[in-house]
Image (cartoon, rainbow, N blue to C red):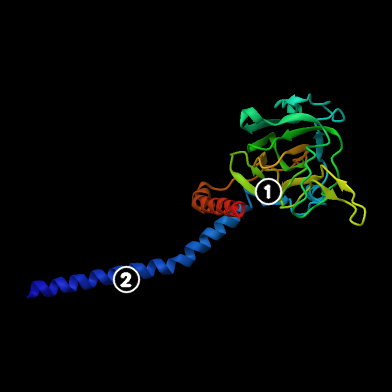
Amino acid sequence: MYGRQLEKVARGLQRECKDTERMRLEALKPSLLAAALAAGSLFAGSTHAALVGFVADPEENSVLWAEHVGGGVNRDMTFDAGGAFGAHPTGTLDSAFYTDLGVTLSLGGDPLSTPTVTFGEGPGDTGLSGIQSPGEGAHAASNYLAFQSGDPHTLTIDFASPVLGVGLNVVDLFGTTSNLVIEAFDAEGYLLDVFDSVDLNFQNVDVDPGPDVDRRLNNVYFMGLASDEANISAFAFTADGNDSIGVDDIVFAPAPAGGSAPSVPEPATLALLGAGLTLLGLTRIRARRARRRG
């Protein structure tokens, strides 16, 4: 009899212990969340400074980007004779053409349809559907990097020294069906942020609405991003292959003279935020996929 009573007492104590542990964990949740958020704020203020994307205002993106980064913008990567390095030859992209600027260009994707340097005003497609935008004007005839439709390709720009911001002109985008993505990475290869293009038509645009149709092809759409400190070591531009486009006039803002290097967070901070950053990345990827399916 005493054995059964002791057994009941033991089971009761076990349940009480489990309940106490559960209550303790529930009570700790707010503290753990607060600690994670505090660490996240510290992290964002150190290595991963805030990035701003300039993609949402198609008629003023480049102006807003230039105002944000301030003076000292390098505009030599035009692929044309007017640049400080002369004209890039038409044909295969020379990754080392701008190494004197501390910049290396590389292309990823199907080698059978790799983008090439081409002379002209742009692809000149004539799509009419979707919401039209004149962008920042027509692209003048010049050398540009031509992306053909059919296969996704990525242009990666690596910097010998971290920069404050990067941007480029996209020519003749049909954003109704095509999606472009720009991404920034720090010196360790960590993704700093990613921004998508707008769903607008920059192709066959009526620039003078009225009884007389005045259509203009090859309109320019600027896509750029900028940080509040020089921590961008690489920039990636990806086209999904649903549209023929051009890329031209790559610009970047070097670190200001005498600027300090980004501070590095404590290892414990990095470990604490690792899982959170992974979840944020997965959420962003799922959202982008959902938008494309829609």
Residue linked to disc 2? 19
Helix, strand or loop at mark 2 = helix
Image height check: is 55 above or below 167? below
In the image, which is nearer the foreground, mark 1 or mark 2?
A: 1
Q: Which residue corresponds to the image point at 55% horizontal and 54% vertical from the top-left?
A: 283
- Residue that protrudes farthest toward the left in the picture: 1
Front residue of this view, candidates 49 and 261: 49
For this view, does 12 lie left or right of residue 211? left
- Residue that protrudes farthest toward the right in the picture: 212
Residue 30 position within the rendered picture, expressed as x and y whole percent measured from the top left: 48, 67
Front residue of this view, candidates 127 and 67: 127
Residue linked to disc 1? 177
N-terminal of the pair, mark 1 or mark 2, is 2
Q: Which residue corresponds to the image point at 76% horizontal and 27% vertical from the top-left?
A: 100
Counting the numbered discs, the total is: 2
Q: Which residue corresponds to the image point at 87% horizontal and 47% vertical from the top-left?
A: 215
Q: CA distance from mark 1 to mark 2?
A: 55 Å
Q: Quadrant of the C terminus?
A: bottom right
Residue 94 position within the rendered picture, expressed as x and y whole percent measured from the top left: 72, 25
Q: Quadrant of the N terminus?
A: bottom left
Q: Amino acid at mark 2?
A: Asp
Quadrant housing residue 8: bottom left
Helix, strand or loop at mark 1 = loop
Q: Amino acid at mark 1?
A: Thr
Q: Which residue corresponds to the image point at 60% horizontal and 45% vertical from the top-left?
A: 191
